[in-house]
Amino acid sequence: PQPRDISVCYREVRALKHPIEHPETARIYLDQNIALGGYWWLFPHGEDQVNIGLGLQGGRGLDPKHLYMKHLSKLDILADSTLLDGGGGVVPLRRSLHSLVGFGVMFIGDAAFTVNPITGGGIGPSMQSGSIAGRVAVEALNDEDHMDEVMWRLNREYTRAYGMKAAGLDIFRIFLQSLKNEDIEFGMEKQIITEEDLHRVSYGQADLPVREKALRVIRGLTRPTVLRHLTTTSSYMKKVKQMYHTYPEIENFQPWSDQVNTLFHEFQEKLSK
């Protein structure tokens, strides 16, 4: 993992002076000027309280609290509000480790990057990895002669449960982080990618749709690079998922891991053109 594989965050919980509209709606905003390589959020807790903050891609040399104070603290909705809690932290933001086991040790949760690479949310996949690890640990302790082979089941089962999905989402994460604000606005305005597409793909509920191809090509002619990169992203999301379908046994792990790294490197090279 590299510094760019984490998100550096700052958030505050504030009591509002004036009730918020649509308190049942959580808001996530992609804005590279405010949250470079990440996003900022506003999550209502009822009508009179919000959790608001931002996360930046690591390795950028930026201070999330400074950007919060510069951009978000001045929002009208926070006028005359009261600070209830505030603080920062670091969140993993990439696909899960290629192997969650080694040298008789298992890694789960944030230690193994078992998160959604788009949002940084990790409660669900961390519980999945923990549940599988607990069961496999019992099996391994009851079969000490074959402990390494039994522990390897954590990798295979977690890959099927979530790791494969996380790898595809990591491709999409890299694509999103390559975009400028004008690219995002153009893509949404021309419906090259819709809000529904973004929501479903960001939570691994669907592959990136490059549908209605003829219509979307026409819509994208004034900014062809965005459409080309979107098509490339869709293709590589499928490629990496196919690769994870062939998750190997221990003896073939290193060549497989190298192939995954090569695939991601290829994808990043294509986005740079």
Image: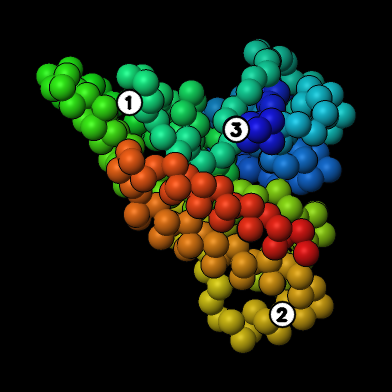
Q: CA distance from mark 1 to mark 2?
A: 45 Å
Which residue is pictured at 55% across the width and 28% down the height? 45
Among numbered discs 1 and 3, the one appearing first in the sequence: 3
Disc 1: which residue: 130
Within-10-Å neighbours for mark 3: few <14, some 14–19, many 20+: few
Per the image, the residue denoted by label 3 is: 1
The foreground one among 22 and 175 is: 175
Image side of residue 179 versus residue 92, left or right: right
Residue 49: which numbered mark, if any? none
Residue 123 location, x and y as percent?
43, 29
Q: Residue 219 shows which numbered tag?
A: 2
* The C terminus - image quarter: bottom right
Residue 7 drawn above or below residue 201: above
**Colouring convention used in this rendered image of the protein:** rainbow
Mark 1 neighbour density, 10 Å: few (under 14) some (14–19) many (20 or more): some
Which amino acid lies under the numbered mark 3 shown in the image of this protein? Answer: Pro
SS class, disc 3: loop
